[in-house]
Image (spheres, helix red, strand yellow):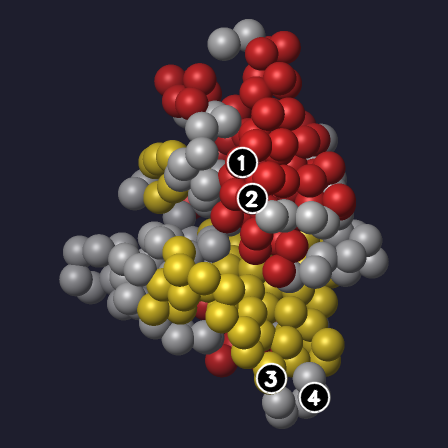
Amino acid sequence: MSMPNHARARSRMVEVQIARRGVRDRAVLKAMQQVPREAFLEPGSARFAYRDTALPIGAGQTISQPYIVAVMIEAAEVRPSDCVLEVGAGSGYAACVLSRIARKVYALERRAVLVNAARHRFETLGYGNVALRFDDGTCGWPEVAPFDAILVSAGAPEVPVALKRQLAVGGRLVIPVGTRRVQTLMKLVRTSENTYQEEACGAVAFVALVGAQGWPEDDGHS
């Protein structure tokens, strides 16, 4: 597939897979149109970039289905002035989509091979308002907290306490919670220093969120 065809496929993805299925936030639709998903895949997989599915990116991880990326960002109500944290950056695709909307994006990834590849993509594509760190995402990034929005791109057994604490009052946290294979996408809004409002946003299936406040990695499913 040539680059012009990638552009046409991206436009069709936004229209058919995302907008027609209910995503209405114009900033989200515009950002999804701007970021080349094929650049976040291994060369042999680039021709599948705009299929309505998750795809492998190595290290046992996947790049999320485009529709799910859009749903999560819309649920997080990301605004141009926001400071956003993404946990489980993987290929870096969702962080770059977020960077087209938010003022600053901080991203965490626990697999060094994915961190190195994502950093190279950020530099090559010119996404200068994304900072990426190799670390346990379940513990967040306390030095730069609080965050206006936090998105977790992996399934957790429960919402990590560290992430709840690093959310600004009025901030939104979007995270899949459930088993290792099937989760419910949850949205938490911090309504005061000690209270949160929760909302279920539908069934999803993400790879496991491994870390100190996530799933253990000692059973061969990291």
Q: Which residue is mark 4?
A: 192
Q: Which residue is mark 2?
A: 21
Tag 2, which secondary structure?
helix
What residue type is disc 3 on?
Answer: Tyr
Q: Nearer the viewer, mark 1 or mark 3?
A: 1
Q: Marks 2 and 4, how far apart in space? A: 33 Å
Q: Which residue is mark 3?
A: 196
What residue type is disc 1 on?
Answer: Gln
Specify which label sits upstream in the sequence, 2 or 3: 2
Quadrant that contains the C terminus? bottom left
The 10 Å Cα crowd at callout 1, few under 14, some 14 to 19, many 20 or more, is many
- Marks 2/3 in contact by CB < 8 Å: the verdict is no
**What residue appears at the point 70 percent right and 31 percent down from the top-left corner?**
34
What residue type is disc 2 on?
Answer: Arg
- Marks 3/4 in contact by CB < 8 Å: the verdict is no
Q: Marks 1 and 3, how far apart in space? A: 31 Å
Q: Marks 4 and 1, how far apart in space? A: 36 Å
